[in-house]
Every structure is written in C-alpha cells, then in structure tokens.
Image (tube, rainbow, N blue to C red):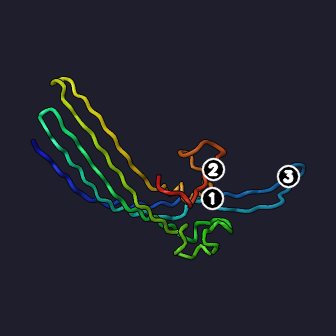
Amino acid sequence: DSTQLTLGTDLRYQTNFVQSPSTFIGVIAATNTPVFTFTTNFNIPRSSSTNPGIFEQCIFKFTEDLSITTGARCDWVGINADPALIGLPPGVYPSGDNSVTNLENPIVNRNFILGSGFATSKYNITPEWTATTGYGFSQRAPTFQELYAQGPFMQLVQSSYVQTFGNTDRKSV
C-alpha cells in the first residue's frame, strides 16, 4: 500500500585522555631502606575519534496488517592518538620503526569502515496480538581503551589489582 524512505547522516566526535601516574619504591624489608624509586605513567594517550556516517531506513507497508522494515548504515571512523604519549615499548611497531613521531605509523592513526543492516517484519494477527521477527548485523570500532591503554587502573572498567592493556592491532568488531 505505501512505502516510507528515510535517509540521513550524522557526525560524532570524541576525545579521551587518562593519566594514571604511579611511583614504585623498592625497599629492603629488614632495614626499611629504599633501594630504588621510579615514576611511570600508565596512561591512555590524548586521542580523538571522528565518525561521519550515513544511513537509510525503508518501511514497506503491504497491507494494513503486514509491514517490513529494512535499514543499513555505513560509517568511517578515524582514531588518532598523541604520538608523544603512547609510550609503547621498543619493537612493537609493525613497520619496525620505533619512532612514535612517525604520523604514518598505524598505531598512531587508525581508520575503520563499518557497516550494519537489519530487516524486521510485523504482522497484526488481531488488534491485541502482533507477531514480529527481525535480524540485524553491525560492527563497531575499537574503543580508545582497547587500542591504547597502557595499564591504567580504571575502577569502573576492572576489579582491583588488574590492569588493562590496549592492542593496537585490533580490527573492527
């Protein structure tokens, strides 16, 4: 009987920065004498994410009781981190270049193309009863923590005495 098409676009921008400085003191237990002290920063570097996306939704109404809705979405996500604050150990760079100032390094700048789609159907059996079915698929880009965490203690993300470490080789999921 009728069809309704909706098209749209959106833009999301996010920033993130977590510092978790820690000081470690090595002490001889018997004499309580400090042997060494060092301070480090288990951080999530200053990072940003830009995410423009486009979407469509179409509702097909075949009869007063039967309709099918479909939709799709495509997003590009660009994630960038401050190379001076990544603090990764030597040897972890895929290119073999241990310089974090290399802005072409995929650890510093990551890009993801994501897609999603769905289809649902709705059938009004009686005015009181409706049957619905649906199927969908979607992807998401890794979070800042999943990419860049260097062991911060984040109370909301983990339990005590556990640290999170990012994996810069993550793919969209």
x, y (%) of residue 102?
56, 76
Figure label count: 3
The residue beneath circle 3 is 32
x, y (%) of residue 164?
60, 51
Disc on res. 42: 1
- Secondary structure at numbered mark 3: loop
The residue beneath circle 2 is 163
| Residue furthest right as drawn | 30
72 displayed left or right of 166: left
Nearest to viewer (mark 2 / mark 3): 2
Q: Residues within 10 Å of mark 2 (few under 14, many from 20)?
A: some
- Secondary structure at numbered mark 1: loop
The mark that comes first in sequence, 2 or 3, is 3
Which of 78 and 73 lies nearest the eye of the viewer? 73
- Secondary structure at numbered mark 2: loop
| Residue at left offset 31%, top offset 38% | 134
The mark that comes first in sequence, 1 or 2, is 1
| Three-letter code, disc 2 | Gln
| Three-letter code, disc 3 | Asn
